[in-house]
Image: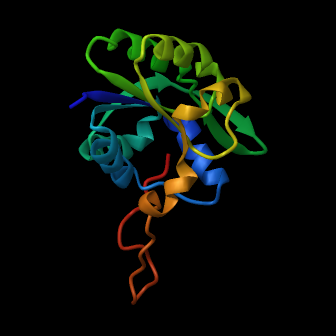
Amino acid sequence: MYINYAFIDSQNLHKGTQESGWKLDYLKFRNYLKTKYNVEKAYLFIGYIPTNAKLYKQLQEFGYTLIFKPVLEIKKSGKTEYKGNVDAELVLHTLINIDNYDKAIIVSGDGDFHCLIEYLDEKKKIEKIITPNNNYSSLIRKYAKYILPLGTIRNKLVKDIKKRHSRGKQAYPLVVL
């Protein structure tokens, strides 16, 4: 059986599913990757914000290996947004680990990964490109045979929102990236 690794652009994944109107259950997603694609390691590339320590711990407990990127704080209309572009780290770790896995699963719809996907395809090292939605870059459309829009399996991965009967609060905290 193949040993596969997943390389996940967390911001692209989070924003893509959010724009499609649903929240991803990261534990279900990790289990899906393991069961469907025999993913031994799932690298999650994520911006580091100190106040998200509990989130990071939970993701690690789910089985993700977190690769942190420092973030920029951007003030917009009185709100603080965080930007942590993880593209270089994702490409670097995919190539550093290339001899450790049989096939790679790239989780992103970002066209910036075109050259990485092209290289992996040439080396016969690409298993799947999982895009957060159908709105992925035209630069990766030529690799359609590898593309799986996450929305097609949404029912297996959607975050259940359970509420307590007495107070209407969630029975457990939502994981928000």
| Picture quadrant where residue 74 is located | top right
Q: Is residue 57 left or right of residue 170?
A: left
For the point 38% across and 82% down, the residue is 164
- Relative to residue 166, is residue 127 depicted above or below? above
Point out residue 15 in the picture as x, y percentages from the top left corner.
Answer: 61, 44
Quadrant including the N terminus? top left
Colouring convention used in this rendered image of the protein: rainbow
Q: Report x, y in % for residue 92.
A: 44, 12
Q: How many marks?
A: 0
Nearest the viewer among 5 and 141 is 141
In this view, 9 is above or below 156: above
Q: Position of residue 53 (x, y in %)?
A: 36, 41
Q: In the visual, does 63 lie left or right of 118?
A: left
Residue 108 appears in the picture as rendered: no
Residue drawn at x 43%, y 11% is 123
Q: Nearer the viewer, residue 61 or 92?
A: 92
The percent position of residue 126, horizontal first and vertical second, equals 44, 23
Q: Write the residue at 58% across / 24% down.
A: 85
**Pick the front one: 125 or 8:** 125
